[in-house]
Image: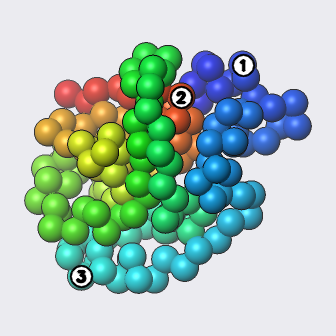
Amino acid sequence: MSNFDTTHRQMDGSRFSKIVSETLRAAGWFPGRRVPTDNWRQRLEADSFRSSEVAVDALAEFGGLQIRQRGAGITMARESIDLDPCLALGERDRFLQFEGLIGRGLFPLGEGGGGHFFIAMSDEGAVFGVADGIVQLGATIEEALTNLILGIRGVAIR
């Protein structure tokens, strides 16, 4: 979890800080949200992606959200997030390249930065930004969303 989020947690112990929760809620998220994932999963599996339970779970809660934001963040600009995994259709080769580098499977969750990078989840639940390189955005979907919403730079994988 980012240091910022840990020190700015809501007093009620919720998963997200107040600003992150407000941003997610403005995009249509709410605690307990569940949306169907079968269409996304089937389309991506037909394109040779392999889904995992943790990725499908993340999509059930956050899939379809469009977070429109911009401006200065903590260590990088805050950019828009589009949690539509089918935006990665046709990009399986790019994901394969980075799966070999990190030694884990990746399943798309959507795009960030106005389409400048894909957001993907490993089989273990870590979240990555995939473009010409790969960056770990967070160890969990909560940490990754927090970092993206607050503008906290991920860790580059070499």
Q: Which residue is mark 1?
A: 7
Mark identifier at residue 150: 2
Which quadrant would the C terminus be assigned to in this image?
A: top left
On the image, the x and y values in percent for residue 18 come to 74, 34
Q: Quadrant of residue 72?
A: top left
Secondary structure at badge 1 equals helix
Instruction: Report how far apart the C-alphas of labels 2 and 3 lie in the structure.
Output: 34 Å
Q: Residues within 10 Å of mark 2 (few under 14, many from 20)?
A: many
- The reply to whether callout 1 and callout 3 are in contact (CB within 8 Å) is no
Residue in the picture at 24% in, 42% down: 116
Secondary structure at badge 3 equals helix
Say whether residue 15 is left or right of residue 82. Answer: right
Q: Earlier in the sequence, mark 2 or mark 3?
A: 3
Q: Quadrant of residue 76?
A: top left
Q: Can residue 138 be seen by looking at this rendering?
A: no
On the image, the x and y values in percent for residue 150 come to 53, 28
Number of dots carrying numbers:
3
Instruction: Report how far apart the C-alphas of labels 1 and 3 lie in the structure.
Output: 43 Å
Please say if 76 is above or below 28. Answer: above
Name the residue nearer the viewer: 117 or 71: 71
Q: Residues within 10 Å of mark 1 (few under 14, many from 20)?
A: few
Name the residue nearer the viewer: 130 or 97: 130
Please say if 87 is above or below 35. Answer: above
Q: Earlier in the sequence, mark 1 or mark 2?
A: 1
Residue in the picture at 20% in, 76% down: 47
Foreground mark, 1 or 2, reads 2
Mark identifier at residue 46: 3
